[in-house]
Image (cartoon, rainbow, N blue to C red):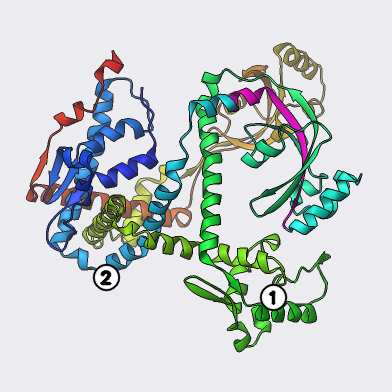
Amino acid sequence: MKKLSALILIISLIASISCGGGDRDTSDPQYHKKERAESETIAKIGESELKVFLMEDFDEMYATDFASAEEEYNAKKEYLDSLINMYVFVEAAYELGLQKDQEIIKLVKDSRPAFMRDELFKAKILPFIDVSRDEIETWYENMDEEVKMSVIFLEDSTRADSVFNAIENGADFAGMARKYSLDEASAVEGGDLGYRTWVSLSEEFQNNVFNLEPGETVLFSVPGGWDIATVTERREVERQPLEQIEDMLISRIQAEKKARVQNEFYDELFEEANVKINEETAEFIYDKAATLYPDVIGGVPFRKNTFNPDDLAQYERNMILATYNGGEVTLGEYLLQTARWNDNQRPPFNEIENLKKAIFNLKLMDLLQQKAEDMELSETVDYKDAARFYKDQIMAAKMKELIVEEKGFVSEDEVAEYYQAHADEYVVPKKLHVKEILIETEADAERIHERLQNGSNFDELAANTIRPTAQNSNGDLGFIAEYNFPTLFERANQLKAGQFSEPFPVGDNWSIVKLVAVRDQQVKLFDEVATQVKTELENKKKETALEEWMAENRDRFDIDVKYDLIWETIDKEEYE
């Protein structure tokens, strides 16, 4: 059996394709890697080639279990055929010179930053998130206990020191959390985070908090500020066998490592960015905010961290707020782009160091792009393959558009005629108004059923239903369709209005339903579905046009496929 990941599939796919021909990139960068150079061609479509290691990597990436070698072969063959068809459209697109189409050129150019950032991730993050056996065992050993903890989050180190010292000298932790913590969700609970396991914690909390004794308090730095944390209780918990949760642990450890490595990289990038705040501009806007705006807005103290650009003259909006290696940020740009941020993400204009971090976050995408360019990542194998495959995808899509642009037209008469012939396909399904009493055991269900037979009120008994969504409505489920509650619908559909059913099993519980009313199936009016019908007809015509085009044109291109090579990528012994 094989389970595969779609993300790696795309990476391998784009690395498994090469194209030659006029106005194409014929450098074939994929052959710079030995395993790619030695990989056989499994399919050739005109001047495009697909390599066999696409099928080999498919073993690790396909997200389905295979019951047999034949099933795996058929899945790979079907996928290979879909790629071949795509490249028939690509070859036709090159014949028409679509590689010179301005829209395609722009789309490829606009994709460049995203592909560059992908390469930066592969270079700076991906190599450092492998998980060792020791790490898995360490995490597992710490899963036999959980701790009840509370936290206070602060952005300013001076304020954090002050609050921490106050708690150490006897101040109430919960009271200080409600008063000072910037983490609103936990602040209202006095900082209480409840019980947490080792696995649920970030690396900072694992290292600084998890092993504290009840009553101990600690202050430590976290991304974006400082945390003050305390442990109030510890208790043992039962853990599942390692083999049952190992995949989950690996995923969690990788996520933790990724976050840490990424933060370290961002710290490095922040230093390289050399963000400098124009303190005169910062002081100007801080004072102006203090002058024009009240100290309290909507009952919340105004932190003087934002400003309406419309209240500034044009020359004021053009004032330089910050510079960094690669550019500058005007006051107007900063105000406009941070207007969508949460209030706690925008520091007051007089907090220079925090303002630097805000500028860094604002320009992070630009800085990542610049870093990738400095590292010449556009020359890497994976970047060139990704850009090439993306271009081929766009060209295939453009070719399809040209094929169907006229043949996909649907007239109003065609829509009306289709509706008349297929009206029974456009219906509102039958619905039943149902009330239910859901009970845990058969014995309890029988006792309630007996009380109903003796005249007890259904609604009063339904007040104790255990179905969460109906507990506040005395078991009233409203109108249900068969696709929502198939078992309940089947039983209720056998009743007349006002009748209730015998007890019947629903999962691990037991149910008694009462039919209140019936809405019979209704055909939707033409005006309600005209747009839907038109879209369906257009799609059918387009699909037919593409099939006809493929049947007429596929043989124009030299297509050579070696399906037998698929078997070389299948381990038949696994299925014996």
Residue 193 magenta-drawn? no
Q: Is residue 233 visible?
A: yes
Relative horizontal placement of residue 193, taking residue 427 as reference (left or right): right
Residue nearer the viewer, 160 or 522? 160
- Looking at numbered disc 2 in the image, what kind of residue is underneath it? Gln
Magenta residues, start to end: 139-155
In x, y percent, where is residue 166? 88, 50
Residue ID at (30%, 50%):
382
Q: Is residue 494 visible?
A: no
Relative horizontal placement of residue 161, taking residue 555 as reference (left or right): right
In x, y percent, where is residue 163? 83, 52
Most extreme residue toward the top is 443
The residue tagged 2 is 102
Is disc 1 placed on a helix, strand or loop?
A: loop
The residue tagged 1 is 307
Against 185, residue 283 (above or below) is below
Residue nearer the viewer, 129 or 199? 129
Gap between marks 2 and 1, in whole Å?
41 Å
